[in-house]
Structures are given as C-alpha cells and as structure tokens.
Image (tube, rainbow, N blue to C red):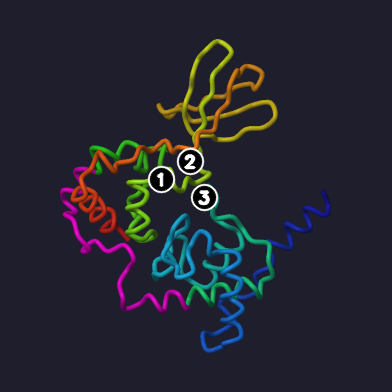
Amino acid sequence: MRLLLALLALGASAQTRETNPYALTDRDALAKGRQLYSFYCVFCHGMDGASGRGSQLASSYRKHGSSDREMYRTIADGVPGTEMSGHWIEEDEIWKIVLFVRQIEQNASGRGQGCRADAGGDPVRGAALFQHACGSCHSAASRLGPDLAAIGATRSREHLRESIVEPDKVISRVFRAVRVRTNQGEAVHGLLLNQDQYTLHLLDVREQIRSFQRSALAEVVFPKESLMPSFAKSFSAGEIDDVLAHLCGGKR
C-alpha cells in the first residue's frame, strides 16, 4: 500500500513545467515524439491525427484544453469515462509527444478541418433526420450513446460516416453491449457498466441501472454487435450526407 501511494504521488507531481521545453525546430525531440506517438497513440488517433477511435488531433480544437499544460495532463492522466487512459511514462517523453501533436496541428492548418460541413449535404435536413433517428440516444440527456453536439470538432467526416453505416466495426469499451438471462427467464439487454466475480451491473435500453448476482444469471453474452443499428439501408446516400453536414457543423 505504501508503495502504491508513493507511485501515485510521484505520478501526480511529475509535471514540473507549464510549457513545453522543446520547440518544433528541435529535430531530435520531434523525431522521438513521433516514435513515442506511433507506439502509444497511433491506434486511436491515426498517424496523421485524422481520428478514428480517438479524437481528431489534426485540428487546433481540444475539448479538454489546448495549452501545453492541459495537453500534458490529458496524456498523463487520461480522460475519465473514455478510452483515453493515462500514461505512466517519463515527463520528458510526454512533452515530446505533445511536440509531435503540435506538428500535426501545424500541418493541418490551412487545409481545413477533417469534418467539413460544406463537403456535401444539407445540414438543416440533416438536423431533422438526426433528431428523429438518433437524438434519443445521442444527446446530453442520454447515457446509451455519446453526446454528438460537438463531435464535428473531434472526429473526421470519414469516421462519422463509418460509424453511421458500420457501427459494429469499432465499438468503444465504454459502450460495450451485454445480454443476460436470469434463472427465472428474464432477458435484459444493455450497456455493461461493471462486473466482477460475483456481480454484474448494466444500463438497460430504458436507461435503468440493473444489478445482478452472478449466481442469479443463467446466461451472460457479450455481443459483437453495437447497440446502435446500421443506417446503411435506413438512410439514402444523400440522407447520410445531410446528417454528416449537420454533425460536422456542430458547435466548436
């Protein structure tokens, strides 16, 4: 326990600077930052920062702060409730990752955001379609899906299109589906909240938290499919463009 507390204290006090000690002109630091980024960050953010599972870094917008200090803390501590975990690496290495992300920002400037509202589609029609088909799950009031009010600032248009037509391709662990059947035959489907050897807790499709003793469950299944249905057949190509125009034009 003492060792754990010491490690936590060390992690909390690791940041000794407010601004990055490295500049974009430092080729060695930039090369090391690229190497570290390719190891720790590329899977979710893409090598060009265009997004995917993680937020779009090829942009000056940062939901959790764009200063050197704020970006450092995001990398070091992660973002609770998301797939962005903290990284127990040296302070010097985190600063070099921040440096490489700054280069991604710089390279992206002048060529527009990855999620452009003017790349096709009618945002007004898209807003109506979104509200009708998606709004019940993707709003600040719902916990069944992420709030998409500002998603255009953090995800690329290509990623959003893929999420609409192929929602099963990449499923965040935060929105992992689970299906259980009790010993009495009740079937419950929803999002996994947490589980251990003895209990399982989920959020059902009516957004009610349900808790079960493992001994009371006859079956526990983790489907490979997302709770979100595909709209590849429900929406026409033009309607998908309309929804994308709406999402990409969201508040920043």
Q: Quadrant of residue 63?
A: bottom left
Image coords of residue 105 (percent x, y): 42, 74
Comparing 168 with 152, the one in front is 168
| Local secondary structure at mark 2 | helix
Do residues under tags 2 and 1 come within 8 Å of each other at their CB atoms?
A: yes
Q: Earlier in the sequence, mark 3 or mark 1?
A: 3
Residue 96, above or below 14:
below
Q: Is residue 234 above or below residue 21?
A: above
At mark 3, the secondary structure is loop
Membership of 108 in magenta stretch: yes
Q: What is the distance, in whole Å, between disc 3 and disc 1 at their CAs?
A: 10 Å
Q: Nearer the viewer, residue 108 or 150?
A: 108
Is 61 drawn above or below residue 238 in the view shown? below
Given this view, does label 2 or label 3 mark the residue nearer the observer?
Answer: 2
**Which residue range is magenta in the image?**
103-129
What's the amino acid at mark 3? Answer: Thr
Left or right relative to 4: residue 95: left
The residue located at (83%, 52%) in the rendering is 2
For disc 2, the neighbor class at 10 Å (few under 14, some 14 to 19, many from 20) is some
Tag 3 residue: 82
- Amino acid residing under circle 1: Pro
